[in-house]
Image (cartoon, rainbow, N blue to C red):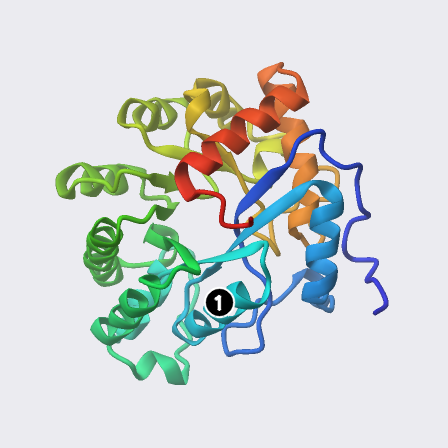
């Protein structure tokens, strides 16, 4: 398969193995991820091979739209280094509830055939599949106030509570999507009781929120934006985090780290994020990799073995 120039070149292998604890592989279902610039997706074989050459030994694919739930489980069954996390994304929950109000970002919500399934039925399917061993987390769930007006926000809050309850019932980690909703996410977690292993995926808060996470034993997973020049507050948050509560991810196919910002992302590109994190923390790269890997195993176990 011809390699697209829109994907970054491969980097040197990390000195110690790591896991991409949140990514999205393009799948042949309705929820196919549109890659930046319309670039063709890398095959799964190439994705896995590049990740392994980079020292990324495990990857958690988040299936967060109804058509992608079964496909995520199938992917995890087919590829040993891959596990699944399942949920109904907060932006999807309001559509399943028939709420299409335009949010603050001005985005007009588009309805697709699977949104005719009720929200209760969609979450019930998440619950059914999440009990499988291939599924290592419930997520991504949470709140996205950037894309929701008040009616949609109310639906998101109730769906978030349902996912929290499911993660606790199954004894599995919770992966949180938190966009412009820090205060409400924290309030709901404290009110309902957070799962023992709670991860803020693609952490976007500041040092103050990092201190809240650390105090409660919650995890912050950092992605490419921690390397962006303007995100000093995010780097302050990384410095403020309890080191035993730091994870790393891509959230591919978007959010490629510097120096490849704007290009299609993939698990192997995570090496640049880790280098940036080590520079921010002023720690040796091997030490950081080993710390993050230990944290990852504490949350998800060793599903890639």
> What residue is shown at x 19% (from left), y 43% (from top)?
188
Residue 185 percent across, percent down from the top left? 27, 42
Q: Nearer the viewer, residue 48 or 247?
A: 48
In the picture shown, does residue 265 fall above or below 294?
below
Identify the residue under disc 1.
Answer: 72
Q: Quadrant of the N terminus?
A: bottom right
Q: Is residue 261 visible?
A: no
Label 1, secondary structure: give it: helix
Residue 260 percent across, percent down from the top left? 74, 44
- Name the residue furthest top: 282
Residue 290 percent across, percent down from the top left? 58, 26
Residue 182 percent across, percent down from the top left? 31, 38
Q: Nearer the viewer, residue 254 or 109?
A: 254
> What residue is shown at x 27% (from left), y 52% (from top)?
167
Q: Mark 1: few, some, or many residues within 10 Å (few <14, many ≥20)?
A: many
Number of numbered discs visible in the structure rendering: 1
In the picture shown, does residue 265 fall above or below 70?
above
- Name the residue furthest left: 191
Q: Is residue 301 visible?
A: yes
> What residue is shown at x 71% (from left), y 29% (from top)?
15
- Name the residue furthest front: 305
> What residue is shown at x 46% (from left), y 31% (from top)?
295
Left or right relative to 288: residue 133: left
* Quarter location, residue 227: top right
């Amino acid at each position: 398969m011809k390699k697209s120039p829109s994907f970054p070149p491969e980097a040197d292998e990390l000195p110690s193995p790591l896991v991409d604890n949140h990514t999205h592989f393009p799948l042949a279902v309705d929820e196919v991820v549109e890659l930046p610039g319309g670039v063709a997706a890398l095959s799964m074989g190439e994705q896995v091979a590049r990740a392994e050459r980079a020292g990324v030994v495990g990857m958690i694919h988040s299936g967060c739209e109804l058509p992608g739930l079964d496909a995520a489980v199938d992917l995890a069954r087919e590829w040993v280094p891959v596990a699944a996390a399942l949920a109904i994304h907060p932006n999807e929950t309001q559509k399943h509830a028939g709420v299409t109000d335009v949010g603050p970002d001005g985005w007009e919500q588009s309805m697709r055939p699977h949104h005719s399934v009720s929200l209760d039925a969609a979450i019930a399917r998440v619950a059914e599949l999440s009990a499988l061993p291939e599924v290592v987390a419930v997520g991504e769930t949470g709140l996205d106030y950037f894309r929701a007006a008040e009616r949609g926000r109310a639906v998101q809050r109730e769906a978030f509570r349902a996912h929290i309850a499911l993660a606790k019932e199954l004894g599995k980690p919770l992966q949180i999507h938190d966009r412009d909703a820090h205060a409400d996410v924290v309030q709901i977690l404290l009110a309902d009781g957070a799962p023992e292993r709670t991860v803020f995926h693609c952490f976007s808060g500041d040092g103050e929120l990092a201190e809240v996470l650390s105090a409660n034993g919650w995890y912050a997973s950092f992605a490419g934006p921690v390397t962006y020049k303007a995100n000093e507050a995010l780097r302050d948050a990384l410095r403020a985090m309890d080191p035993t509560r730091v994870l790393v991810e891509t959230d591919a196919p978007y959010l490629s780290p510097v120096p490849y910002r704007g290009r299609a992302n993939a698990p192997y590109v995570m090496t640049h994020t880790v280098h940036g994190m080590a520079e921010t923390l002023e720690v040796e790269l091997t030490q950081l990799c080993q710390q993050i890997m230990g944290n990852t195993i504490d949350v998800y176990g060793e599903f890639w073995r």
